[in-house]
Image (tube, rainbow, N blue to C red):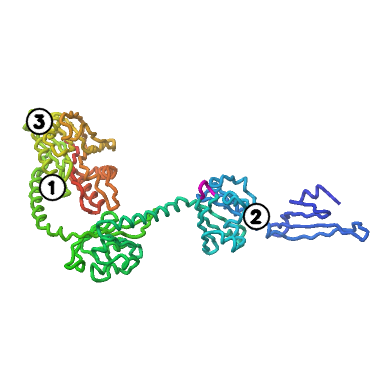
Amino acid sequence: MPDEDLEKKYDEIIRDGDSLVAKICIPTFGIEGAYFWAKASPLYNSQGEIIGAIESIRNITEKVNAEIEIKKTISRLEQIINFLPDATFVIDLEGKVITWNKAMEEMTGVLSFQIHGKGDFEYAIPFYRERRPLLANLILWPDDEEEKRYASIIRDGDALIADFFLPTFGKDGTYIWAKATPIYDKEGEIFGAIESIRDVSKRKLAEKESENARKRLAEIINFLPDATVVIDTNDIVKEWNVAMELLSGIPATEILGKGQYEYAIPFYGEKRPILANLVFKPAHELEREYSQITREGDTLVVDTYLPKCGMNGKFVWAKATPLYDPYGNITGAIETIRDITDRRKMEELLARSKAELEIAADIQRSFLPDSIPVIQGFDITAKSIMAKEVGGDFFDVIPMELTPLGKGMFGILIADVSGKGVPAALFMALSRVVVRVNATWFLEPEKVITTANAIISQDSKAGMFVTLFYGILSDQNRTLTYVNAGHNPPLIYRSKSNSFEELQITGMAMGVIEEEKYKQVSIQIDEDDIIVLYTDGVTESVNPSNEMFGEVRLKSLIHKHASLSSHEILTKIIDEVQNFSEFQPQFDDITLLIIKGQNN
């Protein structure tokens, strides 16, 4: 007896011929309610008359709850997958798409709503231009013949990983990396498979270029004038050039592919690490093999004696550095060995030259002030650390009492001469004397530097120049009137505003253009203001990673220690620079002059 109102009480009801199939939730059945599936059909007698009806009822609560849980899982999975960087899709047990993320849309040009619910391998068409199983399908339906269609496929637990070329995808084909794995419900039952696809064309091209580069490198290495060996991370010889054959007496054919330090025998008479092996070792282990070793970034340099090399042994210079792949991973090391035996014959001459340099350094140090005069209202300190025996940095504090109207005024000077060694020291001496003499003639900094520049330019025949900051510090009106001739702009920390200013360049470096005109600028120095004059040896100091100390770190130090005296601030800066560079060899002079305003 059909009853439309009664049928509406069922969640779902379907007519199948003269049968009714229904699904219904009965909340009053059991503790938490239950879901039932029911099917009813009429019963007929032999004359075809309905004599009754038969109904089968099945409790499908567990199945429905499992389906609900899967839907929740898929919903959560969709949210996660949609934000994955790799193109990713999910299929159910029937091979139909249930998730197709944004990255997959971008890779294929097929939108999620266009592919959602599609099966019959339709999702393979954007890649292969035909319907065929993908890795995700092979997870659900293993097929040895289909797996053979992949050039390379790896099983990792229950996952499949493939790396292959797709000539049908993209303009010129695409190198693809793909990974597929089953998806389980909370009972551990598989309800689908997920596959991520990544375009690795750039990586593959980089690998090819790396291989081509390796071949080119081998050709270059073979013709290097210095003896050169290349080993991999397993200490196996990969390259052994002609110069190395001559130095060691071992042909490349006899040593290529050899390991276990066998390549050290021609030099040391025993198997032991050479410099290239030490590239892979921690820093604290280096001194076990060599008494003196220098690290320049990730490069090792040593100057040593090889007793078994040649007839009477040889003094050699060796340099080893790691080799990297395009992704920054170490793939091996290269070592270059140079015979410097002849150089040792020059050591006596060099020793005499060094003694002469030490004398020059003493003379240069004599040009620097022994002490800083006490200036009312200011706390001043200065220091210069030479990178070599003699250098090009200098500073000066010049009392101006001998000049007219110079009472209570002092000349403040810091400079950096181009170049290093004796030439720089001589040019420094000339520059200092010329500036000092002119400082006694003129009170205005612009006149002092303009006149000094004309003299220095006339005597600068070797293209040398000097960057210089010169100013007049007055203890009466607490001002600094200055000229900046191409020097690093000194920093001034204003204590009241807790801010920094820079004393900008007001003219070109001295010794470049004879007719250069310089402009002077005056600033006020208040109590606790700090002026830091420095040379580029401070900010351009580098650490083992080749990173510069920089102006930002210098400002941070000044700000952090602003409450200290000028001497304490200077000490903090020098200590920090040396700690930053990890006490590597100093490549440039370091000079600092610090002025701090005080209460009169």
Query: On the rendered structure, is 399 left or right of 32?
Result: left
Please say whether residue 592 is one of the residues in the magenta stretch.
no
Query: On the rendered structure, is 473 left or right of 215?
Result: left
Residue at numbered disc 2: 68
Residue drawn at point x = 53 percent, y = 52 percent: 166
Q: Position of residue 486 (x, y in %)?
A: 21, 35
Q: Is residue 258 above or below residue 380?
A: below
Task: Please state which amino acid type lies under the numbered disc 2.
Answer: Ile
Q: From which residue to which does the magenta span run?
A: 169-173
Q: Which quadrant would the C terminus be assigned to in this image?
A: top left
Q: Position of residue 85 (x, y in %)?
A: 50, 49
Quick one: label 1 or label 2, which is nearer the N terminus? 2
Name the quadrant containing residue 494. Answer: top left
Name the quadrant containing residue 313. Answer: bottom left
Q: Compare residues 173 and 251 and report the one nearer the observer.
A: 251
What is the chief secondary structure element of the magenta stretch?
A: loop
Task: Please state which amino acid type lies under the numbered disc 3.
Answer: Gly
Q: CA distance from mark 1 to mark 2?
A: 83 Å
Residue at numbered disc 3: 406
Task: Please state which amino acid type lies under the numbered disc 1.
Answer: Val
